[in-house]
């Protein structure tokens, strides 16, 4: 009996860590921007995207210069979405995704952007399933930027999501560079939390193990 208890107590930290790490890995990759695509003052696509965890995902990109004789470009590749405007253009850009229906709300609570480079004037709008809107907002900084599903006009769209559109705009000659786009949860524990949890469980299991070993048999 004591042997079974010792074996079970040894497994407690491992089982707990497995459960927590499983939650930490719940992020869903939408686009890692490794599938190359580019457009200059126009639209191109759809192309099949391989760097994704969504089924049958295709992508259309559009660059619209303003005024029309200026230059706006969208370029995707090597892990980045790049948007650039010449000195005369305050152009707009968009990325449209279509994919098999997925319940993102079951595994995440928001969309996470990795912003590598951005002009202060740049804004982004997102539209889920063609109707649920997160209206234009200033990105404002480099780093990770999260837009929660609750910030959309109809968060329920993420229960059965089939399309997502990203619209970008900014002041004259604005530029932007973005890393991978994912659906993620802000409730994922930090690495330090994982360590403390695992350490605490291991210490508890060790204490119980010692108690089992040292308890004398009755009679």
Image (cartoon, rainbow, N blue to C red):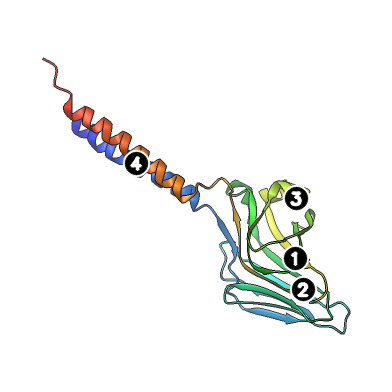
Q: Tell me the quarter of the picture where residue 79 sits.
A: bottom right
The answer to whether mark 1 and mark 3 are in CB contact below 8 A is: no
Q: Give the position of the C terminus as an image quadrant.
A: top left
In the image, residue 42 above or below residue 135: below
Task: Looking at the picture, tell me which residue is in the foreground, 173 or 154.
Answer: 173
Q: CA distance from mark 2 to mark 1?
A: 9 Å
Q: Which residue is mark 1?
A: 120
Q: Tell me the quarter of the picture where residue 136 sits.
A: bottom right
- Nearer-N-terminus badge (2/4): 4
Task: Looking at the picture, tell me which residue is in the foreground, 163 or 126.
Answer: 126
Q: Which residue is mark 3?
A: 152
Q: CA distance from mark 1 to mark 4?
A: 46 Å
Residue 49 as seen in the image, left or right of residue 166 = left
Label 2 packing within 10 angstroms: few (<14), some (14-19), many (20+): many
- Nearer-N-terminus badge (3/4): 4
Q: Which residue is mark 2?
A: 174
- Nearer-N-terminus badge (1/3): 1
The answer to whether mark 2 and mark 1 are in CB contact below 8 A is: no
| Residue furthest top in the image | 219
Label 3 packing within 10 angstroms: few (<14), some (14-19), many (20+): many
Label 1 packing within 10 angstroms: few (<14), some (14-19), many (20+): some
Q: Which mark is residue 13?
A: 4
Q: Secondary structure at mark 1?
A: loop
């Amino acid at each position: 009996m004591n042997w079974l208890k010792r074996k079970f107590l040894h497994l407690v930290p491992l089982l707990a860590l497995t459960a927590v790490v499983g939650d930490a890995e719940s992020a869903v990759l939408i686009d890692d921007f490794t599938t190359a695509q580019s457009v200059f003052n126009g639209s191109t696509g759809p192309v099949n995207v391989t760097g994704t965890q969504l089924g049958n995902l295709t992508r259309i990109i559009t660059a619209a210069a303003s005024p029309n004789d200026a230059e706006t470009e969208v370029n995707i590749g090597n892990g980045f979405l790049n948007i650039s405007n010449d000195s005369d253009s305050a152009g707009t850009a968009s990325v449209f995704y279509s994919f098999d229906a997925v319940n993102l709300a079951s595994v995440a609570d928001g969309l996470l952007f990795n912003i590598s480079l951005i002009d202060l004037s740049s804004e982004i709008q997102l539209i889920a399933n063609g109707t649920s809107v997160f209206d234009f907002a200033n990105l404002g900084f480099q780093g990770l930027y999260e837009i929660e599903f609750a910030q959309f006009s109809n968060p329920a769209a993420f229960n059965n999501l089939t399309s997502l559109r990203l619209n970008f705009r900014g002041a004259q000659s604005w530029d932007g560079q973005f890393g991978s786009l994912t659906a993620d949860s802000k409730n994922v524990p930090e690495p330090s939390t994982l360590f403390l949890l695992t350490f605490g469980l291991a210490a508890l299991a060790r204490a119980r193990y010692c108690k089992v070993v040292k308890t004398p048999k009755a009679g």
